[in-house]
Amino acid sequence: MASVPAACASRGRTTSPDLYAAAPFGQARLIHFTDCHAQLLPVYFREPSVNLGFGDAIDRPPHLVGDALLQYAGITPGTEFAHAVSYLGFTESARRFGKVGGFAHLSTLIKRLRDESGPGNSLLLDGGDTWQGSGTAYWTRGRDMVGACNRLGVDVMTGHWEFTYLDEEVMRNIDEFAGEFVAQNVRLTDDAIFDGAPAFDENSGHVFRPYTVREVGGRAIAIIGQAFPYTPIANPSRFIPDWTFGIRASELQDLVDSIRQQQQVDAVVLLSHNGMDVDIKLAGVVTGLDAILGGHTHDGMPKPVIVNNASGRTIVTNAGSNGKFVAALDLDFGPGGIRDFRYRLLPVFANLLEPDAGMAAYIDEVRAPHMDTLTEKLAVAGQLLYRRGNFNGTFDQVICDAQRQMGNAQIALSPGFRWGSSVLPGDDVTMERVMDQTCITYPETYVQEMTGEQIKAILEDVCDNLFHPDPFYQQGGDMVRTGGLDYVCEPLATSGRRISEMTLDDGTHLDPGKRYRVAGWARVGSKAPGPPIWEVVAAYLREQDVVRINKLNTPVLKGVGRNPGLADYPART
């Protein structure tokens, strides 16, 4: 692999009076989007004000928020680009610059990027989390998004939430997908191999094609798929019982070596759903990768991270979420491989891009049978409702408050998902916005008794997934949200010792041996007995008229100091 010039890193973001204009560069263009979470229409989406990093990850993307991120990337505050990548002044800037994303607008931008690069000189890559996240995706079992991606012209994709449908549904959707689905790290279990379960390669046990080689700009580029490695832990394994996952770094190294020795490729790219921190570590231990185009952690990276390793350098990027961004990586080849590159993260502003007529018509067709449900007005937002952030968001609090009230519970727990659109103050909270926040294939709710000790164990386990010092043991989500419960969190403490001083809203300390009535949803193991979470939240909102958060249950953070991944946070030491 040719060494990527260090100077390229300083050219990571280029903008102009036309946000999307740039001079052609190199021979091949890789166009990348990821984690759109089935958002076919433009939405509002607030970036986090809390994205903590420690150790090697401190002072480094993606763990920079607000002003720290703008300074790192050289972005002028108050601009449309600053609004796209940061939470700063979100409500006012959202009203000024409008909604983002939407597949009709995405289609227009992608066609422009393809036209700029010329016929045969571009490849469209989808990093996954595409078939889940909206009401229409849930009701069609992801098929609406397969149709949208076929019209978008996706060439290659990998996955994560795609695997939360039944295995036969996953296979059916892949059969209908016009591009290639790749995942080197998904294998059959030993029992499934013995039973003759279907696989791309029965000898190796690969369920899906591990990689593909495409000619782009007259150069052979290998695209290796890396699905989310912790799928059967973070999501129900009962949906995909024959498949095993993992990071599989050694197998990836063997595959890269084999491709370079046997395929005579000009570049090797990993299309990843690991999460940014995992990808950065992987780039340091796996040689021969020219670039990792990543997803899962929803980090919109205005500049790539350049990782040095034994064979040279690897470009590591992440292209945000919710259809909000498209990334363009332009590659210039010399005799020894990649000689130089240009990277741009392009916000998809619906006000600046004309919607593609064909895609818009398809979206209208998909949504038509469900419009009465999607457009039901449940309440009015009395403040900004959003999710994204390590510990809690106002829409998460609405979900927790709904569970507590409707389930007559003292405490509510809600998963730390990173998807879910935002609602501006004064706007209607419709059933569609509730579905955006809750729409999964295991949405059933529960109310049960738990001891204080059990509740602490849950918080400790999720906290370790988030703040484990080794990125390979991080699962890339955010902390479980709590309703009616406050606590102190010390991210740098050892496993099992990060959570302390747990108190109810009335100030009563949680007794480890006492039992409490706890409401929750999204049980990963056996199916929960209650109604879907969106029914619980909708019933609660219909009683509210105007939704206001009386108390946001966020932990007091201990030992974080002046961390650049933390801004506008009221309680820290």
Image (spheres, grey):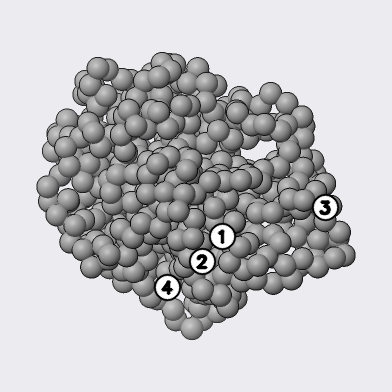
Q: Is residue 261 left or right of residue 532?
A: left
Residue designated by label 2: 536
Outermost residue on the bottom side: it is: 195
Q: CA distance from mark 1 to mark 3?
A: 22 Å
Q: Do the residues bearing badges 4 and 2 touch, measured as CB atoms within 8 Å?
A: no
Residue designated by label 1: 402
Please state which amino acid type lies under the numbered disc 4: Asp
Near-viewer residue (402 or 200): 402
Image quarter where the N terminus lies is: top left
Q: Going 25% across and 47% down the picture, which residue do you hit?
A: 103
Q: CA distance from mark 4 to mark 2?
A: 28 Å
Please state which amino acid type lies under the numbered disc 3: Thr
Task: Identify the mark at residue 508; answer none if there is no mark.
Answer: 3
Task: Identify the mark at residue 167; answer none if there is no mark.
Answer: 4
Q: CA distance from mark 3 to mark 2?
A: 27 Å
Residue 571 picture quarter = top right
Q: Do the residues bearing badges 4 and 1 touch, measured as CB atoms within 8 Å?
A: no
- The x and y percentages for residue 488 are 77, 42
Please state which amino acid type lies under the numbered disc 2: Val
Q: Do the residues bearing badges 2 and 1 touch, measured as CB atoms within 8 Å?
A: yes
